[in-house]
Image (spheres, rainbow, N blue to C red):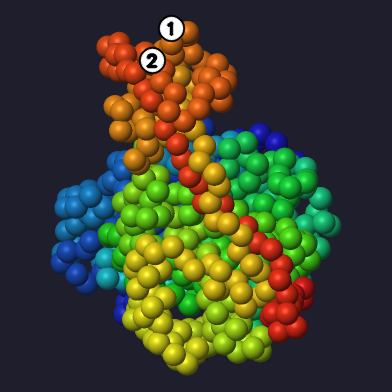
Amino acid sequence: MIKSIFLSLALISFSFNIFSLTVNYSVKMESPNSHYFDVEMTISDLKLKTTEIKMPVWAPGSYLVREFAKSINQVTVLDASGNPIKAEKTEKNTWSIDTKGHRQIKVKYQVYAFELSVRTSFLDDSHGYINGSSVFMYVAGNKNISGELEIIPHASFKTISTALEKKSNRIYAFKNYDHLIDCPIEIGNHIEFSFDAAGVHHTVAMYGEGNFDVETLKRDMSKIIESETKVMGVNPNKNYLFIIHNLTVPSGGLEHVNSTTLQVNRWTYKGADYLDFLSLVAHEYFHLWNVKRMRPKELGPFDYDKENYTDLLWVMEGFTSYYDELILRRAGFYSEDDYLNKLFGTINYVENQPGNRVQPVAHASFDAWIKSYRPNENSVNTTISYYSKGQILAAMLDLYIIKKFDAKKSLDEFLQQLYQDFYVKLDVGFTEEEFQANLEKFIGEELDWFFDKYVYGTDIIDYAEFFKTVGLDIMDKTTSSSPSLGIRTSSSENGLVISTVYLNSAAEQQGLSVNDEIVAINGFRMNSETFAEFMESIEIGDEFEILLSRDNILKTYTIKMGESKRYQYGYEPNFTDKSIEHFQYWLRID
């Protein structure tokens, strides 16, 4: 198990070439409890009068400008003799250096790293985790360069885990800057184990204590990998690395071309939580095809200076979300009912989001940078998740293809074709128009009706028609009306506070607002328990008096209880000889 150990990773260095230019890095961690990486960047064989160095503003796979330069301090530049050279910060993430007459310079800076997420870097006395886009600067215009990375850890740290190709004891090779920062590094005394699956050697680096069993993980992760490789027809890797952080408060997963970082609760490896873990494994692993290789044109090569907009995250994340659950069925972890309950749970979640009637899923993809990663108290009313809505659309397309080809083809074959046409043959991304055109070519008909209504529109999906092909009748889609004030509340040091007000709800129509503290109802002091009890005791149309504190001003409202109608889709088997064949093909076990 991981112990608390003083970390001092002495040096990380690498070099690359373009024309005659070489760049070497070193990263020292002499005081891990300060959480600072001391970085030194040596640029040699310079011929330019001015050299620009840049820091990425975001991490690929996480669509938010995180402003990594905000964690950089004390940037200094020295010539080969150690004398200071003029350097000027010209933009938030760019430094311009006067290199006229200098063949070699050294750029020194500190990076504060104390956010342990899958998107950032972290340093303390127990381990070091490096996510390259938050640590390494690059020379502007010089990203397409191969080179080597040297890692020299502190003597008390025995294990280095990274997907970079190991050349010698501490030397690792990278193809270019994109590749370098796409290979996270775990350094410490973590557990490391390996297994082979789908012809690929897999290594798992386990940081932190947890209730995991290594042999169980080898068996179950292998099943997922084998099933996903069958979906795509080929596995492009020779080696793959899972970095797993077992924590109290995890942050999910982030995909890389031949590795992933997963963060989970340390006690997640038993019961229902374990299936959620396997679903996360399936999700991030599927990304090695879908987004890391088969991708929108905006997502590689990357522009690290700004947002990289695309309408296709509903495909990249939504299709991946569809397969991360379907794979658990194909690998034998879910029964048919388990899988269907998961899928219909997602359907009911999406259809009961007010934002599903406001924001098309293509727009949710495009606006990920400003909305998905920055939700506020009104987001439920105006946005929809491209993960969840995209998952449903993937399922509908799968059912449509199964019907079209009489259970001889599915969404699997379309993804295989897309992968071959754009990645294997050309290694280029596709546009929104090319994605639709290729789907239409595969199916053999135009699909404007699907894209106009469901991708770029907000129509309610015709679930009955799609599910008919697999013999499932869709049950009554609404429940009876129920009393509803239309709010969410949270308990804080300020009392019982309204955290969400739903669109067109009784609360919104009658003047209640987010951040209002609910002090009393009908003269009785409220807390979360008594408020829940009161809400259960009243009927639609009942009136009550509510005392609020808004900005420390007491206000009294007379409220008439409203109602809500929730979409509640269910299914009932109604098989024919043909539909049972389609159903079994859809939910087959490998």
Percent from the top left, x then y, of residue 37?
A: 44, 44
Residue under the image location 50 percent in, 46 percent down: 566
The picture quadrant where one finds residue 296 is bottom left
In the image, 71: left or right of 174? left
In the image, 162: left or right of 301? right
Q: Secondary structure at mark 1?
A: loop
Viewer can see residue 241: no
**From the image, which quarter does the N terminus lie in?**
top right
The picture quadrant where one finds residue 459 is bottom left
In the image, 238 versus 35, the foreground residue is 238
Label 1, on which residue? 523
The picture quadrant where one finds residue 5 is top right
First in sequence: mark 1 vs mark 2:
1
Percent from the top left, x then y, of residue 92?
A: 23, 50
Classed neighbour count for the residue bearing mark 1: other residues with Cα under 10 Å, few (<14), some (14–19), many (≥20): few
Viewer can see residue 6: yes
In the image, 450 versus 217, the foreground residue is 450
Question: Type of residue at label 2?
Answer: Glu
In the image, is residue 123 above or below residue 297? above
Marking on residue 545:
2
Residue under the image location 81 percent in, 50 percent down: 213
Percent from the top left, x then y, of residue 439?
A: 46, 84
| Distance from Cα at disc 1 to Cα at disc 2 | 8 Å
Percent from the top left, x then y, of residue 367?
A: 32, 57
Residue projecting furthest to the front: 541
Residue under the image location 37 percent in, 84 percent down: 434
In the image, 278 versus 213, the foreground residue is 278
Residue under the image location 81 percent in, 63 percent down: 219
Classed neighbour count for the residue bearing mark 2: other residues with Cα under 10 Å, few (<14), some (14–19), many (≥20): some
Check whether the beta carbons of the residues at disc 1 and disc 2 lie within 8 A of each other: yes
Question: Type of residue at label 1?
Answer: Gly
